[in-house]
Image: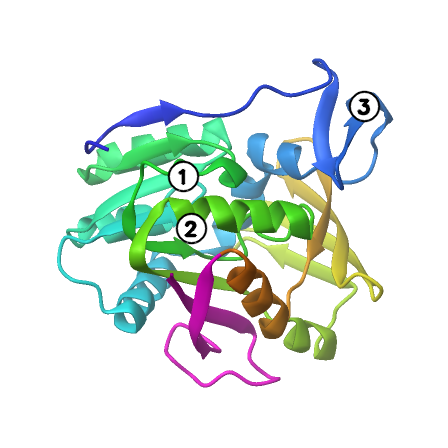
Amino acid sequence: MPKGASVNLIPKEKGGENTVFLGPQRYIKKERNKQMDWQGFFESYFYWKAWVFRIDPERTAKEVEGVLELLKPKSGSHFLDWAGGWGRHTIELAKRGYQVTLLDFAANHIEMARRLAEEAGVKVNFVHSDFRQTPASIQADYAINLFTSAVGYLTEDDDLQAFRSLHAALKPGALFLIDTMNLFWLVKNYQPRGWHESEDGKRRLLSERKFDYMTNRNISREVYTEAGGEEEEHRLDLHIYSAAELATILRRAGFEPVELYGDFNGESFDFDSKRIVMISERR
């Protein structure tokens, strides 16, 4: 795929214009659904507005430095930022001379990332696609999935389909690094309510959470307010994986987990690790 290329691979929605895919192999009418809304969460700019003020560029740069230290890629290697959102890690990798492909299902994320890449003066390949349908033509040397992105929002079957499509999009022997929440840490430190406010006090995010112990899914109500704006609300339902669960589904998809850490700095993984940072090899 040539540098700077852009392809649109979003599948048409099934069931008509008022239907959206939301989970376990069923389609639910939008007007009847007052619960989980993962598509609206990302496509409405809610995710960007409610999270960007909590993530500074220094943090992003440190995360990318950690990824590079753990993977030790050769200069100029091809990275796939899988479900990479608006490209905060993509652009940092491109600045360091790597060829980078950004895949995301949200058109607004792709357009934001394109503008940010132009402002940064770097070239990025953009793929507008559902992560369950990752194009096999990408053939990257490395893939990353950071900040609990995409994986867990749907069903385990969907995640398996996505991992299998990622497997086909990587070269044999390629390494895949995934960073997500650690189930063990979350259970020990569970907070049914959360509150975040920007430094200037103009943006606020309230989270109300409930954990489903039968499914290991975190169900949350996210309410964002901004000075002079209306209150916005979305509901999410996220499967929180244990390291063992994640390793199992990756093996089913054709990967072999080879390393497990508790952070980007290479700390050993244990019950108190806030993150799962797992590296797998594409077999």
Residue span colored magenta: 254-283
Left or right position of 3 against 279: left
The residue sitting at 22% across, 30% down in the picture is: 4
> Can residue 161 be seen in the rendering of this structure?
yes
Residue carrying label 1 = 103
Amino acid under disc 2: His
- Label 1 sits on what residue type? Leu
Q: Residue at x 21, y 63 (%)?
A: 73
> What secondary structure is marked by label 1?
strand
Q: Earlier in the sequence, mark 3 or mark 1?
A: 3
Question: Where does residue 71 sit, x and y in percent of width and height?
Answer: 29, 68
**Number of the front mark, 2 or 3:** 2
The reply, left or right, for residue 58 in relation to residue 273 is: left
The type of colouring in the image is rainbow
Image point (58%, 51%), residue name:
160
Rounded to the nearest angstrom, the CA distance separating label 3 from label 1 is: 27 Å
Q: How many residues crowd around disc 2 within 10 Å: few (fewer than 14), some, or many (20 or more)?
A: many
Mark 1 crowd level (few <14, some 14–19, many ≥20, 10 Å Cα)? many
Q: Is residue 104 left or right of residue 11?
A: left
Q: Nearer the viewer, residue 56 or 172?
A: 172
Q: Which mark is residue 167?
A: 2
- Where is residue 137? Give x, y as percent: 32, 36
Labelled disc at residue 146: none
The reply to whether callout 1 and callout 2 are in contact (CB within 8 Å) is no
Residue behind mark 3: 29
